Image: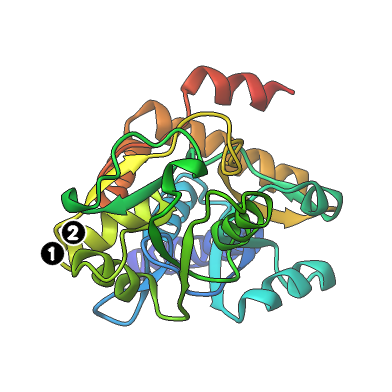
Amino acid sequence: MAFAFAAAALSGCGAADASTSNATVKVVNVATSGGPAPYVLKGKDGELDGQNIELLRAIFAKLPQYKLNIQTVDFSAIFSGLDSGRYDMGVNNFAKTAEREKKYTFSLPLYNKQYAVATTSGTGITTVTGLESFAGKTLIQSPTNNVGVALKAYNDKHADAQITLKFSQSDLGAMLSEVAQGRADGSINDVPVNNYYAHTLGLKLKQIVIQGDNELSGISPSYFIFPKDADRQLVSDINNAFITLVKDGTSKKINNKWFYTDLTPKLSELQSENKQ
């Protein structure tokens, strides 16, 4: 009887501790559109995966005081959900713009973006120092993303050095397949995108990073975003956990897995920005 009473007492204490512990855990509602790869995608098991998602989960593995609740929504609904307070975070390879800075809070930069042209050896495209390097070439692009808009703006200003633009609504893998098949001279994308599809689709492509001061320079790194009145403790905890993952090499490992290269920002720069 004494043993049974002691066991019951211990069981009761454990339940109370668990209840107290659960009560202190804050649910963090995260919104993502579920794409594009390799940043966010559906894995073979149907679960969300990709660089953004794996990094997010690694960060929250360091933060037991929070519980992740990731929801897949339309891209535009991420912003409206942040505005209304429905979501605490947006995770979708977000760049920082002046307009967004007025409305949202940003994490530390998660990785540095680079633009590069995916091309083949027979096109004659070698070193690229600006968009004028593509004069007389055919590029296949989305008409609505940042690159497509920049290319149209370039053509408007350079009547004597036009780039032939082959706009497509196909997914990125299909467009890069057209480059590999010689139906276009190249396609400009983020370095991780070109790497991911070249590897996963087995495309014989070479990648040339775009250098110099041009219409694609000054590219914003990628961030998690939060409402303007975000929980400052949450943002701070996420930033500090991310710095830990940079220190221990986890960020590098995740980048190499999904990007086939490491684009992690310099630790010293992250630490400096985190103090501001």
Number of residue marks: 2
Q: Residues within 10 Å of mark 1 (few under 14, many from 20)?
A: few
Q: Is 195 on the left-hand or right-hand side of 240?
A: left
Q: Residues within 10 Å of mark 2 (few under 14, many from 20)?
A: few
The quadrant where residue 26 appears:
bottom right
Q: Is residue 59 visible?
A: yes
For residue 199, the mark is 2
Identify which amino acid the numbered label 2 is placed on: His
Which element carries disc 2, helix, strand or loop?
A: helix
Q: Is 19 on the left-hand or right-hand side of 252?
A: right
Q: Position of residue 81 (x, y in %)?
A: 75, 74
Position of the N terminus, as image quadrant, is bottom left
Taking the spot 63% from the left edge, 65% from the top edge, the residue there is: 27
Q: Is residue 230 visible?
A: no
For residue 202, the mark is 1
Taking the spot 18% from the left edge, 70% from the top edge, the residue there is: 181
For residue 104, the mark is none
The quadrant where residue 176 appears:
bottom left
Q: Position of residue 10 (x, y in %)?
A: 44, 61
Taking the spot 57% from the left edge, 30% from the top edge, the residue there is: 213
Which element carries disc 1, helix, strand or loop?
A: loop
Identify which amino acid the numbered label 1 is placed on: Gly
| Nearer to me, 186 or 259 | 186
Residue found at the far front of this picture:
160
Q: CA distance from mark 1 to mark 2?
A: 5 Å
| Nearer to me, 160 or 7 | 160
Position of the C terminus, as image quadrant, is top right
| Nearer to me, 205 or 93 | 205
The answer to whether the residues at label 1 and label 2 have Cβ atoms under 8 Å apart is: yes
